[in-house]
Every structure is written in structure tokens, then in C-alpha cells.
Amino acid sequence: MHKPENRKRRDTSCHFHGHSTMDVARGFSLTLCSHFLYYLSKDLRKELMTVLESALDKMAENILNLDEASLASLWEKYKTRMEHFETTKEWEKSVIVFFIINAVRVKNHIFNENILELQKKHDKPQKPPKKKPDLKLVK
């Protein structure tokens, strides 16, 4: 009969540097590197990724509610900040904001182009089906 091995299992289900895993995911208080994710159980990893996806979905929803004209007025400010590199959290955030503004602009451009294309297809008069021409056989 085979005896099960008594292996000590690491408790990875609760804390990382004093923070609960879910607090880490909800607050983004730590960088979730692959090393950290490796030590989590499969179920906890899945739960963490679900929380992360949910947070990203909420961010996207909030971004979609922003006015493009207001964002466009901030574009130059964040472009300038991004171009002047600093080793600060503010510089990092300005890069993220700059790309969020650009993402909204690109999304709207793609959306508008597709709407125009759909309208063109809809507005085109349908060609009547071709009939056989009235031809007579001449010898």
C-alpha cells in the first residue's frame, strides 16, 4: 500500500507582504508579477484575475462616460508631461492618462468610420435585378 507523502504546503491563500490577496487586487497596492501569481493556488489565481478583469471593466466604463472634447483639451498637457521623463509616479500616471485619451480618440475614430460605412451600404440604391435583354435572333 502506498503511503501519502507528508509535504508541508505553503499557505498562499491569504497574505502577501501583509496584504490580503483580494486587497492587493482591489487596490492595486502591489505589482502583481508572475512570481507572485506563481505561488497562488489555481483557484485563487482565477479569482484574482476575475477581480482584476472586473476592475478593468469598471475603469473602461468610467472612461467611456468621459467627454471626448474635454479629454482632447487635456491632450497637449499630458503629451508635454510624458515627453519630459521623470522617475516619479506623476510621470507614470501622465503617460497612462495620455494613452487613455488617445485610446478614446482611436475608439471614436473607428466607431465613426464604421457607422459611415454602414450608412453608405444602407443608403446605396439597390440595383434592380438584371433582366434578360429583349433580343431577337437575326439570320
Image: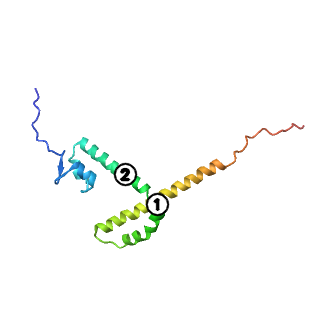
Amino acid on which disc 2 is placed: Lys
In this image, 8 relative to 64: left or right?
left
**What's under tag 1, amino acid-wise?**
Asp
Q: Earlier in the sequence, mark 2 or mark 1?
A: 2
Q: Quadrant of the N terminus?
A: top left
Q: Residue at x 30, y 72 (%)?
A: 86
Residue 128 drawn at (x, y percent): 73, 42
Between 76 and 69, the residue placed more toward the observer is 69
Quadrant of the image occupied by residue 101: bottom left
Which of 139 and 47 lies nearest the eye of the viewer? Answer: 47
Left or right of 4, for residue 114: right
The residue identified by callout 1 is 67
| Up/down of 97 relative to 23, above or below | below
| Residue 45 position in % (x across, y down) | 26, 45
Question: Where, quadrant-wise, is the C terminus in this rendering?
Answer: top right
Number of numbered discs: 2
| Tag 2 secondary structure | helix
In the rendering, at what x and y percent does residue 2 appear?
11, 29
Q: Is residue 99 left or right of residue 126?
A: left
Closest to the observer, 41 or 13: 13
Res. 51 mark: none
The quadrant where residue 92 appears: bottom left
Residue at image mark 2: 58
Distance of label 2 from label 1 (alpha carbons): 17 Å
Q: Residue at x 44, y 62 (%)?
A: 102
Query: Is the image coloured rainbow, by chain, by secondary structure, or in one colour?
Result: rainbow
Do labels 2 and 1 touch, CB within 8 Å?
no
Residue at point 37%, 71% (across, down): 81
How many other residues sit within 10 Å of disc 2, few (<14), some (14-19) or many (≥20)? few
Q: Quadrant of residue 9 in the image? A: top left
